[in-house]
Image (tube, grey):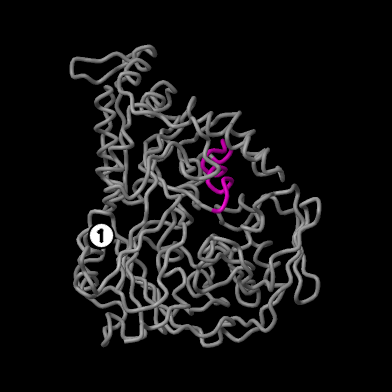
Amino acid sequence: MTARTVRGMATATLAAALITGLAACSKPGGGAAGGPGGADSVVVGIATEPESLSPLLGYGKDGNSKIFDGLLTHDADMKLKPALAEALPEVSADGLTYTYKLRQGVKFSDGAAFSAKDVVFTYRTILDAKTNNASKTELDAIAGVEARGEDTVVFALKYPYAPFAERTVLPIAPEHIAGGQDVNSGDFTTHPVGTGPYLLTAWSKGEKLSFKANPGYWGGEPAVKRFTMAVVKDDDVRATRLRSGELDGAILPPNLAKGFEGDKARKTHAAKTFDYRNVTLPTHHEVTGDPAVRRALDTAVDRKAMVDKLLDGAGKAAYGPVPTDSPWFTAGTERAHDLDRAKKILDDAGWKPGEDGIRAKDGVRASFPLWYTSGDKIRQDHALAFASDAKKAGIEVRTEAGTWEVIEPRMKTEAVLAGGGSPADPDFDQYQLLTSSLGGDGFNNMAWYANPAVDAALVEGRRSGDPAARKAAYDAVQRELVKDPGYVFLTHIDHLYVVNDKWDGPATQVEPHDHGLGSGPWWNVESWKPKQK
């Protein structure tokens, strides 16, 4: 919620309804021998679904969209490799020009030929002011994009944006279809056509997305012929459906994944991630807007206890968007749990304990709500633990559960148990999360954080082509977050998946916050093969 995502919380809107009644009991893949969806089918349970399936509006921007391909994609080690491009780009010496030669013979799933004009159309449309893509700032470096013939695309940049190639995993849309529609509301948003390994066959919002293998896929028709993503928001329901045989696999929180230990028919996959959980501390609230309160909460929280007790060790303490084991992490910015120091910060700032132990200053009680999404056990547990730690320092945090429709209008003044994170580049983690100009822009900068030193460092980090200068810039950002936190970062969470052990191929990558359609052991489902008996 971020970052992202993406819209800050990954571009994905977590608006899926809890599947109950008949929907909860149905077998989303059809129910045939060999598994819930049949011998050549895979049905997986995910927690979220996208708002749109159009890459022009942000769908699949980090890759692995299944329906589409980008110019580039990632391998198992998150290294870039060609997809619709035939090779990695040629980059000019000044870092301002990227030239891509396109793969020959690629067709969209409707049979139309893919060409350079589709690439130009996709990027120009996203950058158009009329397009409702909350992630368009990710392409801020582009000065222009043009086709040179049918098989060459050239990007001109405003400045040498070091991670630009990472931005070209963005899926390519067909101009001949999407170009004739309203980009924000046209049929393409729910009935997409791409060059990817799968075709969408049905989308029952709040229930499932169904795909079939693309027989004309340039990479070869997948062995998994039918692929279904069942949208099951509630963690407990997802685990129950997996155990009952309705799902082939699912993402689960650690305590529920433990219930499948020793199950010889299923395998647990643990993915390292950049996925963090944090608490937004809105600057427009009379309590969380006080820098002393923010610093005190940042010190009062017991991150190690959260990792040990809430995640069963499947994660690590978070002190910012960058994980501590990343080369971009700034050593020395770790914050020790120190309740006495938190209390002193509040005392010195004039927040004095009342008779009930809750502090007040100038008639304002140190109390605020903290929202988390209904049915998300990990967020709920983090919210409750944060509230408990805050109360020990004399701050009352009132936890509330709700859908994003309930939460989003409140984000300017009320705290949220949020999440974000991207492994591709530190710019992806931090620019949308912290840049002051993006305060209130959907899920970007949900805290309305404003720090001129951070703004300047973020610009330096994304515009410099010098790795050492970039490292110095992101070091400056992380040090500022110690002095002036706009968020309290709690944990980085490993993603745990339990999957039926009947296919060769399931594996994990280093994952972003946004997971479900593009991440998980099924990130490469198009290359899975049946296990030989």
Q: Which residue occupies the foreground of this view, 116 or 367? A: 116
Residue 84 x, y percent position in the rendering? 64, 73
Q: Nearer the viewer, residue 365 or 151?
A: 151
What type is the residue that disc 1 sits on? Ala
Asked if the magenta segment contains residue 426, the reply would be: yes
Task: Find residue 228 and report its image quarter.
Answer: bottom left
Judged from the image, the secondary structure of the residue bearing numbered disc 1 is helix
Q: Give the quarter of the image for residue 272.
A: bottom left
The residue that appears at 64% across and 84% down in the rendered structure is 112
**Image height check: is 46 above or below 429?**
below
Q: Is residue 55 left or right of residue 320?
A: right
Residue 482 vs 34, above or below: the answer is above
Which residue is denoted by mark 1 in the rendering?
Answer: 257
Q: How many marks?
A: 1
From the top left corner, tell me how far across and down residue 221 is, in percent: 51, 85
The answer to whether 29 is drawn above or below residue 122 in the figure is below
Residue at image location 39% in from the left, 82% down from the top: 226
Q: Is residue 26 left or right of residue 49?
A: left
The span shown in magenta is 424-438
Residue 399, position as x, y percentages in the image: 26, 38
Q: Main secondary structure of the magenta part?
A: helix
